[in-house]
Image: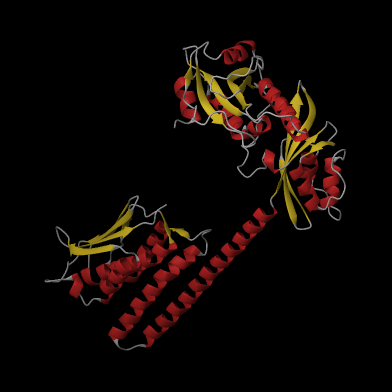
Amino acid sequence: MPTLSDLVVRHTALNAEDLDWLHSLVSDWQLLADLSFADLILWAPLLGEGGWIAIAQMRPTTGPTVYHDDIVGSVAAKGERPLIDTAWNERRICREGDPDWSTGVPVREETIPVRRAVPEGEARFLAIIQRSTNLSSARTPSRLELTYLQSASDLAQMVAEGRFPFSGDEPILVRSPRVGDGLLRLDRAGRVTYASPNALSAYRRLGLHADLVGAELGRVTATLCYSDEPINEDLMIVASGRAAKETEVESGGTIVQLRAIPLIVGGGRIGALVLIRDVTELRRRERELMTKDATIREIHHRVKNNLQTVAALLRLQARRLQVPEGREALEEAVRRVGSIAIVHETLSHAPEEFVDFDDIADRVIAMAGEVSAAEAAVMPRRVGGFGVLPSLIATPLAMALTELLQNALQHGRPQRLQVVVEPGPERLNVLVWDDGQGLPEGFDLDSSTSLGLQIVRTLVEGELSGRLAVKPREGGGTEVTLSIPLPAA
């Protein structure tokens, strides 16, 4: 399905500022749909054709939808939808007309012009919102529904006057309170004129024992949450409805999120809507995850420290040995332990169990080059990027790279040594090649007694479920290919 940006750029004459305004509107028009109990379709004028194209659509969560199919991308010729043409030509909200029964369901249609406030000059009219209400379940509205509809009418007027969305505000986050979470309607003085049952329940959990209706919301909230502390200024601004902002309040272990939407109609503030959501359980889970994450990172840090201690002890022991073979074996063990420590050090700084393996590979390559520089006088190079890999792959892959680089430097005596990475959507292919002495005559991987190659084979085929291939390189040297399956995203 084409995006709003695609449709606007390809089919309309709207500029970049207009597109930004429409993006802000669409990011927050679920509020208007829910308050209206209606579907919303955003129509923009077609470039040079005199018709309309649907560039966005929203269904209500508070009532039945009219359009079960997607309308975005549909085109309407001029005159095909008279209410849209009237709203555009007369720059006003159109509510006239009888319900439409063409689909077998009574639908009330309204149209709202979308206006963008311009600092200098006349405001620009950008598009038309078609508001379609399914009347099949119509009944005598409750106090809550009447409040919703009145609030929707005020918001629609703000859209037509260019006062909604609020200019300069950041897009509303997905986790912001919604209409069904809880709604308060305030008058101009910040007093509550209506409180939905969910909103009242949230304040009961904060410790309120009186009724909210008629109370000054800012004062009540401050009394509940800041009896012994300085009052949060953002709280007073949000709770009084004076600015379009969000805040959270906490009392007695309950955390409530507040979002204020000032209602500015006809040039003056007539009141505000305050959306309320109890986020106690959400914040508790977030804190638990943060604690677990910090614990896991601390474990990785301690494992890294322990491995470095083991490596240091092995290094001391190697220096005391007089037997060259024993010293060489301990030095290889030091390098193997060091490659694992590098992975755990990276994980100790990562917020999740995923790591940037390019950094690990570069450190493994540098470690191999430094240890073997005096003998081989060559520094390995990496070509291509591994990207982000899960730790279950990172640890065995780092060890396998360490073994392959050490084998090439110690036994091949190359002039050039490269690690070529070819990441794909399903498999990670790694080629380690050198231009050294090559494989011994009659080499067979299955019967090889090399401890390093046995370790690599166990890691690649056993732990990573991958494939390992070793063959002579054309022109001299050796090629080792690793093909490792990647977990599904």
Q: Position of residue 35 (x, y in %)?
A: 68, 32
Residue in the picture at 58% in, 64% down: 292
Answer with left or right where residue 87 lies relative to residue 52.
right
Q: Position of residue 194 (x, y in %)?
A: 80, 36
Answer with left or right where residue 266 lies relative to residue 49.
right
Vertical position of residue 67 compared to residue 449: above or below: above
In this rendered view, identify the residue nearer to me: 34 or 449.
Answer: 34
Quadrant including the N terminus: top left
Dividing the picture into quarters, in which one does residue 65 lie? top right
Vertical position of residue 51 compared to residue 170: above or below: above
Residue in the picture at 75% in, 58% down: 253
Residue in the picture at 50% in, 14% down: 51
- Colour mapping: secondary structure
In this rendered view, identify the residue nearer to me: 190 or 368.
Answer: 190
In this rendered view, identify the residue nearer to me: 258 or 310.
Answer: 258
- Numbered marks: total: 0
Q: Position of residue 41 (x, y in %)?
A: 56, 26
In this rendered view, identify the residue nearer to me: 321 or 443.
Answer: 443
Vertical position of residue 67 compared to residue 292: above or below: above
Residue in the picture at 49% in, 76% down: 306
Q: Position of residue 15 (x, y in %)?
A: 53, 22
